[in-house]
Image (spheres, rainbow, N blue to C red):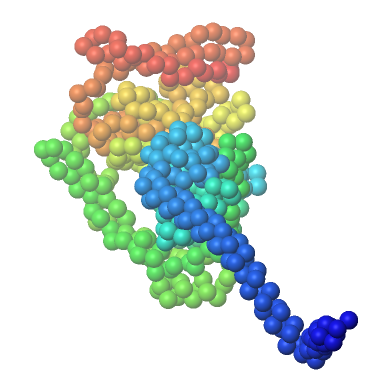
Amino acid sequence: MSNSNLNNLLETENNKKTSTAMIVDNSNKSLTETSKNEFVMVKPKSNTVISVFTKLIIVFICLIFAVFTIFTIFNMFNTNIISGVSIKNIDVSNLSTSDAKYQLDNYLNAKLPEEIKVVHGDFETTISLSQMDIAFDTKNATNVAYKIGRQGNFFENNFEVLSTLFGHINIEPDISLDRQVLTKNLEDLSGQLPDKVIQSSYYIEDNELIITSGKEGYVVDADATIQAIKKALSNFSAQDKPIELVVKTKQPDDIDVDKIYNEVRKDPVDAYYTKDPFEVHPSENGVDFKISVDEAKNKIASEKKDEYIIPLNIISPKVTTNMIGTEAFPDLLSTFSTRYATSNRNRTTNLILASNKINGTVLMPGETFSYNKVVGERTISAGYKEAAIYVQGEVVDGLGGGICQIASTLYNAVVYANLEVTQRANHQFVPSYVTASRDATVVYGAIDFQFKNNRNYPIKIICSVSGGIANFKIFGLRQDDDCEVQISSYETGRTAQAIYSEAYKILKRNGQVVDRKLLSKDTYKRH
């Protein structure tokens, strides 16, 4: 091998070593540089991937934005209720408010009952709903449904539309009603409850004012009960089961003595009459407390009783109704007489006493006459005497004997005047002064004779007992519809123990019978 070749070979080997050494000594730098070189080498490939990915994202975003924009524009111009909305579980999606309301009205309001049943314990009644304008408030419910997805910005609206579409919304419509009318009905029911509040009250008896204390009880809680009614109507349970009234305890109002005094106290009023037309203005007694109002208040405050008695002063008018002369009663409506034996002085005395009590009595239209009330109790202090009466089928002496003849005479005059007899009983035996079924017996505290002035004008009763004749006259004012009155009475049968009879009132106009009414069917014992 030549020297030149040998030198070349050695130089090559040295270069290799040097390169190797450089790599070892500068490993960090060389590796770094190598990494940089390698990064530069792959950079073109990474940029390509990123560029594609970026484009895909941009396209996706643009697509989403386009869909979002279209969705937003659609919702902006959509005039119907959005999808996923129900009212009372009835789907109203994509309906206009008018269409939704029409469908709801047809279905919901048809489910409302005409009346509801309410209860409180054993108490039960019904309330009619026809006057209360009760209906489902479908107008407000459809408006609420329409506003879903339309009340925020477009991001909020779109989110609400999407969430409703997948999540669904159900709207419960309110029940509209006339609260004032229903409240009044419920307040009225408070007075019908078996355990209701009892307010204090008062009444006048003879010369005394009697005040009764109130008692705690229950009243209907109108507001709470209305809510219960609306709930029952809303869930359609009112037709199947009654609604429990919501009640609350209430104390009675305090006794208002001032109010009672103002209502009770009054001045006497004299009676008078006018002509053209005839009109009678009855008298009125005056009333006042016998004690002062403060004394009455202290009495109630200190005694704490269930009942309080306040004495009264009854002030008579100067001119009573009975004092008005017969000139105020221009027409004789009827008259009837019976005979009595003047030899029986005790009996005659009783007849006179009873007739004097009745004589001059004026009965206003609609007013009822009570024989026992007008004549009063038959007592020795009142002047009544012992005379024959019927007791348990026997004739015995009794206080006030004979006054039934006055009742019977008045009864016939009343029938002839075509007045309304409201209470009448026959004797045990047929009396001597009238025929069967023409009598009227009275027993104080047990049997009364009563009749009502069913005419349009007051009547005045004039009676007398004299010379063996008891006579009654009834005066008033004739009416266009007055009829002639006849009484027909007769026996319908007899047995060994009894007599049976009937009486009829026959009404005639211009001589023609226009009516025939049964007065009574009676049974008498035989002597």
Examine the rendering and report whether any part of residue 304 can be seen. Answer: yes
Along the viewing direction, whichever of 482 and 447 lies nearer the viewer: 482
**In the shown orientation, is residue 272 left or right of residue 36?**
left
Q: Residue at x 45, y 52 (%)?
A: 66
**In the shown orientation, is residue 285 left or right of residue 114?**
left
Q: Residue furthest bottom?
A: 25
Q: Residue at x 25, y 55 (%)?
A: 269
Q: Position of residue 71 (x, y in %)?
A: 45, 50
Q: Position of residue 46 (x, y in %)?
A: 62, 66
Quarter assignment of residue 396: top right
Q: Position of residue 503 (x, y in %)?
A: 43, 15
Picture quarter with the C terminus: top right
Along the viewing direction, whichever of 199 and 497 lies nearer the viewer: 199
Q: Residue at x 47, y 19 (%)?
A: 520
Q: Residue furthest front?
A: 2
Q: Where 394 falls versus 299 (above or below)?
A: above
Q: Residue furthest right?
A: 1
Along the viewing direction, whichever of 182 and 43 lies nearer the viewer: 43
